[in-house]
Image (cartoon, rainbow, N blue to C red):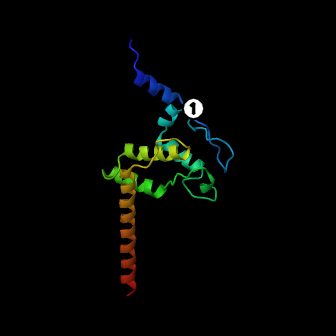
Amino acid sequence: MRHNPDFARKIAHLRLELAPLYSLSRNHIHPDFPRTMLQFNLLTEAELDDLASFYDQSTPTDLTFMYPACMRWDKEFFTQVKEAQAKGKGLSAEQRMAMKRRMFGKFIGLRGMDTPMVEVETKIRWLEQRMQASIEAERTMHRKFV
């Protein structure tokens, strides 16, 4: 069998060990915290959601911004993205997972976890839709009282 240097580099990368992170509110490590890059890449969506919650990121508290980095996790955005995906619109399940994995990776200090422009554009479109819906709701309420 021939030695493939690219494959060997990838295996070495996946074997890299990750330093565990203690929760500020619980003072211990999450049981699903990935110990290697391979485990990081195999995290499920449920595990990522649970990790965000465990590390005080999905519901902001006084501790949210005391970690070395902040996930900027937005449960409402992820819920609406998931609902839109179920209707065949918006991000795919894979894109949503990649977004969550990237946010968690950035949170634990991994390199190469910069926010891609498509993600920024998606979030801006979602915020614009939210603002438009809010404006329409205000107009409707105003018409009822005038």
| Category of crowding for the residue at label 1, using alpha-carbon neighbours closer than 10 angstroms: few (below 14), some (14–19), many (at least 20) | some
Seen as rendered, the residue at the extreme top is 1
The residue at the far front in this view is 5
Question: Quick one: SS at disc 1?
Answer: loop
- Hey, what amino acid is under mark 1? Glu
Whole-percent x, y for residue 3 in the image: 41, 16
90 vs 43, left or right, is: left
Q: Residue at x 49, y 47 (%)?
A: 103
Q: Quadrant of the N terminus?
A: top left
Count of numbered circles on the image: 1
User: Which residue ends up furthest to the bottom in the rendered image?
Assistant: 146
Q: Is residue 134 left or right of residue 37?
A: left
Question: Is residue 43 shown above or below 107?
Answer: above
Residue in the picture at 61% in, 51% down = 67
Q: Tell which of 99 and 17 is nearer to you.
A: 17
**Residue 78 picture location, percent across and down:** 44, 53
Q: Quadrant of residue 83?
A: bottom left
Residue at left 62%, top 42%?
Answer: 21
- Horizontal arrangement in the rendering, residue 21 relative to residue 122 (left or right): right
Position of residue 69 relative to residue 18, above or below, is below
Quadrant for the C terminus, please.
bottom left
Q: Nearer the viewer, residue 106 or 43?
A: 106
Q: Which residue is tagged 1? A: 17
32 is higher (above) or lower (below) than 11? below
Q: Quadrant of residue 64?
A: bottom right
- Which residue does the image show at 55% across and 43% down from the upper left? 109
Horizontal and vertical percent position of residue 140: 36, 78
Give the percent coordinates (x, y) of residue 50: 55, 46
Relative to 36, 115 lies left or right: left
Q: Residue furthest right?
A: 27
